[in-house]
Image (cartoon, coloured by chain):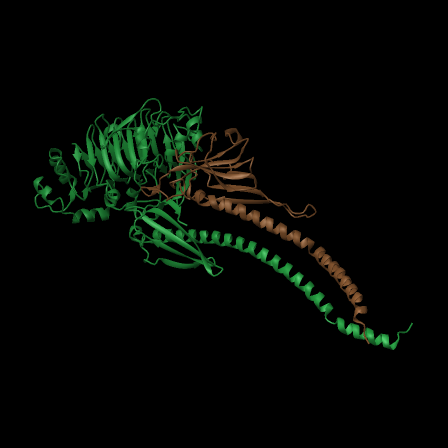
Chain colours: A green, B brown
Amino acid sequence: MTMHPASRKANSTDRAGERGLAMILILAMVSIVTLISISLIGLMNTDVTHASVQYAVARSFYIAQAGLQEAEVQVSKASDPAAYRTPGEGVTVPYGGGQFTYWVDAGLGTPCGDGFVTLEALGQIAFLNRSIPARVRACGVPGTPFLAALFGVSRIQFEGASSRLYLAPYMVGTPGGGGSVGSFTEINFADTNVALNALSEVGSDTVTLRDGTFYDYQLFGFPLRPSYNANPAMDPAPWILSVAGDLIKAQPSTGGIPNRCGTQYACLNVGNDITDVASVPGLRTADYVRHAYVRAIREEILPQLSLSPDPYRAQAAQNTANAALNWIAGLKGKPDSSYTHLQFSQLMTYLAAHPEQPLQGTIFVDGTVEVLRNMTLGSASGNVTLAVAGDLIVDQDLSVTILHDLSTAAGRSTPGIVVFGLPQPDARSTAVCGGRRVNGSGRLVLCGGSKRRLTVDGLIYTADGMDIEPGAFVDQIGAMYHNNRGTSNSSFTTQDAALVLRFDPLALSVFGNGISILSWQQLH
Amino acid sequence: MRHPRAECGYVLADVLVGLVLLGLVILTVYRVYLPTFALSRSLNDRLGGQQDVRLAIDRVARHLHETTLAFGRFRVYPPKSGCTGPYDGCIGFVTARTPNCTGPFQLVDSAPHWQAVIYLWRDTGSNELRLRCDPSTTFPAAMWPATLDPYTVIGTNVVTASFSLEPAGSPTPTSIAIALEEQASTPARPTSQYQTAFFNETVFLPQNR
């Protein structure tokens, strides 16, 4: 069939009039598709942005944590950690696609308190033309590589059924924060009835300290006697454990020290058993040390510490604050505070009769000191450090008092007693009280007796350990570190004696090594 | 001579045919995009769910970083300790922030001065993740408390919650693992294969002793 020419012409004219309709359709379709696509992309973009913001926030937090770690490392590496400071603007380091800035006590005020170091770090991540920050803060004790109230390189031994030990927090403000006991070799409960942090288990128990008589639970911050089940078989892990410190089975960073149990870390054992006790319930229940309350038992690699007598000898040689007292005591013409043991004996004789005239600063004694009279070295505002290059023997029924001004960081970090021993200990040992034998290796022996009392502030350091004989009472605010000179001596032995040690971390800062973090918080 | 009136019906037919064709085209495009819409909705739900869970965890992250795992200061409550019935995934831990567990971090001699206990749990009836600040004590109760009012809702549509100390069974745990499962509030089309439940597990290392 053929179309009439006129009709074909008309048809051609119609199509010419319809030109553009297809374009409109295509444009409409393209518009719809584009709108849908844009909507989808927008939706997903919003979600991806949300997720990315979260990711950036997490990254900035961990970058801030890295900054804090870096600040810790720098303080630890410093020759004097207590003096280390960053510039006011902090130290900024690019890290992990962002950057951190850390401050050490620079422009931060003293949020952590006098004597402590404040570390702060700001982590930042750039995201969507803005910076996403996270800021964290830590408080630490500079110069203190680890936190332990009582630490022995050699064995720590608790003997006698009537031994009472309280390792309490320094500040009585809140339950918790008790001091830890640690050793590189062995912690031995020779008697299963030793009471360690046993807070008024049956009745209300009191302790008489230099600042008053307290219920033992008050030392740990409880205003009232805490109610807990003291029977370890019924409740092997009462909540009261959490206010105490830990037992630290330590290993020196230079390698393990052999012990009776054959373990790499220090061994915790009971009686003559050489089986290493692994857990607190095991200690309290299986091994029947039911009056021992500790928070946890942990293994840790720690640096071995020591003090040198030389700085103390030099400080005493330059300490002329006792020149007038020397003169009165009969040591005419002696301006310094470095004594032979005979000179110091003469000085002690005078001080026993005149306890109102305290010594000041660092006192260094060459040779073994045997305390024969009650002795007060420094009052509550004192700053005495008694350094002995020999042994220090405190005879029966005597009291020794060395107090510091604990309202200042300097007073808290000043050592109380440091016993270095003779450069070459005697080949023959001498018997002292309780059958203990000493040879000038650097031991501190507290002979027994109901009137025996040692009241000390700051660190007690010995080169070769400490013995506390039956009936003695130790009232200390500070910490103890007992070294070993390669002898078979225990680092710390207490027998039927009482020890109240309120742990002050600042007392350990005298080691001038590392930093221990006490608290951590996230500022934003 | 042309007759415009005679062409009117023709143009109408053209428009109708065009509209039908347009409808067919849009329908085809819609069919083509149907899986994309489902995917979009699923993605949206998933991201929204993840976002909700992340926000819930963010709301407790600082508390968990700042707390301690010291014995007696942090408790995970199993069903036998009372975390049963309306309660699921129950933990209690201390905070040094006051007042209302949100103020400044308190220190005593540079160490944390614990001020209150935070209880965190999932309410099985409402699927809410709830938080209660109890300033009357600094030790989480040995048994899960019977009453926990008032509380704050920090997450919704949480269908399971579990908390575990790690390493598992250790007397001295070092971290707390939080696993939350959130159910999308608008489930995807039944015909789609996309998931509607979303998991988030985060491990926190409390920084204080």
| Front one among A67 and A33 | A33
Residue B161 position (above or below residue A514): above
Q: Is residue B9 visible?
A: yes
> Picture coordinates of residue A237 (x, y %)?
43, 29
Q: Is residue A489 visible?
A: no
> Picture coordinates of residue A97 (x, y %)?
47, 59
Asked if residue A475 lies left or right of residue A24, the reply is left
> Picture coordinates of residue B109 (x, y %)?
31, 42
| Front one among A154 and A326 | A326
> Picture coordinates of residue A347 (x, y %)?
13, 38
Looking at the rendering, which quadrant does residue A216 occupy? top left
| Front one among A101 and A20 | A20
Q: Say how many tags the image has.
A: 0
Looking at the rendering, which quadrant does residue A67 occupy? bottom left
Q: Quadrant of the N terminus of chain A?
A: bottom right
Asked if residue B198 lies left or right of residue A72, the reply is right
Residue at the farthest top position: A203
| Front one among A155 and B88 | B88
Asked if residue A441 lies left or right of residue A123, the reply is left
Looking at the rendering, which quadrant does residue B25 occupy? bottom right
